[in-house]
Image (cartoon, rainbow, N blue to C red):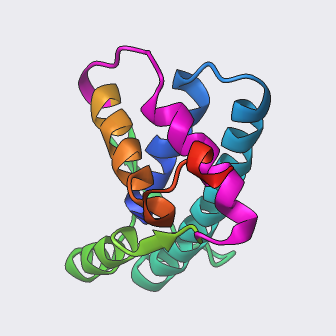
Amino acid sequence: MKLYNYELEKIIDFLINEFDFAGKQNRMRMKFVKILLEKLQEFKEDHLQILKEYCHLDEKGNPKTYEKDGIQYYDVIDEEKYKKAYQELANEEVIVEENETNKNMLLTLKESVENCHIPFRGEKAILHERLCELFDGIYGGETIESKN
C-alpha cells in the first residue's frame, strides 16, 4: 500500500475520529494508526532536518521563528530552496507492506472502511474515497471472506 507523507496526518485523524469501530475492527484500526504514526514521526524528523538546513538557527541549534500578524513562521534563509526540499519530502511515498504480518489488519480495515454506512460530506468524503482507493487492490483484491 502506497500513500504520501503529506497525507499521513489527515488520514490518521480521519481514521481515529470518524469511524465508530469496536472489537477486532478497532484493534486493527489502531494497529494501522500506530504504523502511520511511526511514519509521521519519521516525516517530522526529516522536516526538522530540512528546517535546520534552510533556516537561521538559535543558540541551541533549533530553527528560529518569528511572528507576523499573530502567526508563527520559520526564519527561512532561502525560501525557494526550502520549499523545493519540503515539497520533495512531502511527496515521498510511504509504504505499508502487504506481508503476512499486516494481512489480517489490512484486509479487516479494507472491509470496515469500504462497508461503513456513514454518510461523509466535503473533505471527509474525499478522505473516505482516498482510503477506499488505498485499500482497493491490496493483496490482489483478496477479501477477508476469500482468505478463509
Of residues 93 and 29, the one nearer the viewer is: 29
Q: Quick one: 134 or 90, which is closer to the camera?
A: 134
Read off the magenta span: 98-123
Q: Is residue 24 left or right of residue 89?
A: right
The magenta stretch spans residue 30:
no
Residue drawn at x 43%, y 76% as measured from the top left = 55
Image vertical order of residue 120 relative to residue 33, above or below: above
Q: Position of residue 130 (x, y in %)?
A: 33, 45
Residue at the image position 62 percent from the left and 18 percent from the top:
20
Residue drawn where x is 65% and y is 72% of the image: 99
Q: Tell me if residue 73 can be seen.
A: no
Residue 8 visible somewhere in the drawing:
yes
Residue, far left: 80
Front in this rendered view, residue 51 or 25 = 25
Q: Is 48 situated left or right of 128 in this image?
A: right
| Vertical order, 48 against 119 (above or below) | below
Decide whether the magenta segment is chiefly helix, strand or loop: helix
Q: Position of residue 122 (x, y in %)?
A: 24, 23
Number of callouts: 0
Q: Would residue 119 be counted in the magenta stretch? A: yes
- Nearest to the observer: residue 7 or residue 111: 111
Compared with 42, 68 (above or below) is: above
Q: Position of residue 46 (x, y in %)?
A: 54, 76
Residue at figure coordinates x 64%, y 63% from the top left: 41
Image coordinates for residue 13, horizontal then vertical, percent: 53, 36
